[in-house]
Image: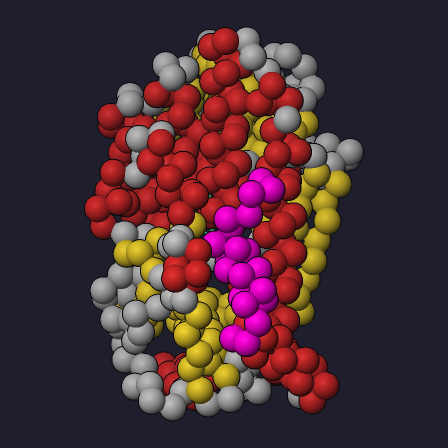
Amino acid sequence: MTSPSPSPHSGSPAPRRFPVVVVGAGPAGLTVGNILRSAGVDCLVLEAESREFIERRPRAGVIEEWAVRGLERRGLAGSLLERAERHAECEFRFDGQGYRFSYTEMTGRHHWVYPQPLLVSDLVREYADVRGGEIRFGVRDVALHDLDSDRPSVSYTDPDSGERLLVHCDFVAGCDGARGASRAALPERARISRHDYGIGWLALLAEAPPSSDCVLFGMHPAGFAGHMARSPELTRYYLQCPPGDDPDDWSHERVWKELQRRLRAADRPPLTEGRLVEKRVLDMHNYVVEPMVFGRLFLAGDAAHLVAPIAAKGMNLALNDAFLLGDGLVAHLTKGDSTGLDGYSEACLRRVWDYEEFSEWLSEIYHGTSYDDPYRSGTTLARLRRLFTSPAAAAAFAEQYLGTADAF
Ligand code: RFL
């Protein structure tokens, strides 16, 4: 598991020192950076890609209300509150009918739709341009050192000079996603649990206005299809496909024919079609790294756990980790209170495992009718109908869909 890391070399400029080095400028890393800066704690964010790239990379769009409130409390939700759409319902389509599920009517809570690139742009601007945080884009070969000591360090290759630079710190926040340097630096004692769904999703982004005012889930014998608004001009769609399928086998015509078929419902207009600007196959899997702390390395977001986009939870988990880690680091570094850092891993993992379980449960709902197995189809349809006939089942679904359980 531990891979050899390029060592900082002795001819390089004198090492710099920061209380915290944050690796990765996604939602997790930038939120941690912003929390530190607003408390006057210095940190350095190291990002492998360019600023332009991370501000455009399309991904998530659904943010839960508790996460919006968490951003708002930390002064990070200004644009989001002005521009994001609030959703109150989702719709399940099966057996040729559409069934509306009004979660806001039931709970008073919403889902917010705000594309991840907009959130990342807001967070970078706030961190670098407003709060004066240091950030290096385009860094290469980031390596973490001496994580089990109280003098950890991070080295990287500067993209301009090509020099290998070393930064000493007290803590490393590993926020560099599923394939970053933090995962590569995990020690043997890390336990990684992985679940493969054995299915693929063709993830699509269409230059087309949303075809409904809410998220659509289509359960069809040919496979799942999903519709999620991203903006008035952009819509994300998903099509279940075999894992490892080649996106090039999915022509424009084939995609739209299949989406129209799987999302068709009586009394609903056909989907509005448009140019496909993203088309990639995701092999659906989850993993959890336990614990989320190794010496002075604190993992957050996808670096610690992946949850397939089935329930739109990944960015929400990343934000939850970032709130806990940012607050914990501030308390430790400014007041000597280490309660938050000591309980960090356990506190994050409670929500992580809950969302992992919900993702599995929802996967059976989405995919259960597509296995050419009449028994599995029968139980899946029974589960679906129960959401519309049993108030207790509906309330349990709404709580997990919105992430509002008190237990966290
Ligand atoms: P990110 O966003 O991957 O950011 C990690 C950053 O680290 C950089 N990096 C490195 N930097 C330095 N050195 C290295 N060695 C590095 N290696 C990587 C990367 O360039 C990047 O900038 O992780 P973070 O911050 O943990 O955030 C996680 C979320 O991005 C992710 O969970 C969500 O996108 C998942 N997800 C969704 N989550 C939701 O909550 N709601 C949704 O609606 C939703 N939809 C989705 C999604 C993920 C999707 N894909 C692409 C799997 C839809 C899709 C299609």
- Residue 15 appearing in the image: no
Instruction: Look at 46% across and 40% down and name the residue there.
Output: 319
Q: Nearer the viewer, residue 143 or 354?
A: 354
- Which residue occupies 52% across, 80% down? 219
Q: Quadrant of the N terminus?
A: top right
Relative to 29, residue 101 above or below: below
Q: Determine which quarter of the picture holds residue 295.
A: top right
Q: Main secondary structure of the magenta part?
A: helix
Q: Compared to 74, does 370 lie above or below? A: below
Q: Is residue 298 above or below residue 405?
A: above
> Left or right: where does residue 135 sit relative to residue 397?
left
Residue at image point 63% right, 64% down: 361
Instruction: State the residue in front, 349 or 230.
Output: 349
Residue 202 x %, y %: 49, 71
- Give the mark count: 0
Classify residue 184 by image quadrant. Answer: top right
The image quadrant that residue 408 belongs to is top right
Residue 94 in view: yes
Q: Is-magenta flag for residue 340? A: no
* Rendered position, 283 above or below 48: below
Question: Horizontal and vertical percent for residue 234?
Answer: 28, 65
Residue 83 vs residue 36: left or right? left
Q: Position of residue 103 (x, y in %)?
A: 43, 62
Q: Is residue 395 magenta?
A: yes
Which region shows up in magenta? 388-408
Q: Residue furthest front?
A: 391
Q: Position of residue 16 (x, y in %)?
A: 45, 12
Q: How is the image coloured?
A: secondary structure
Residue at x 44%, y 87% (from the top left corner)? 97
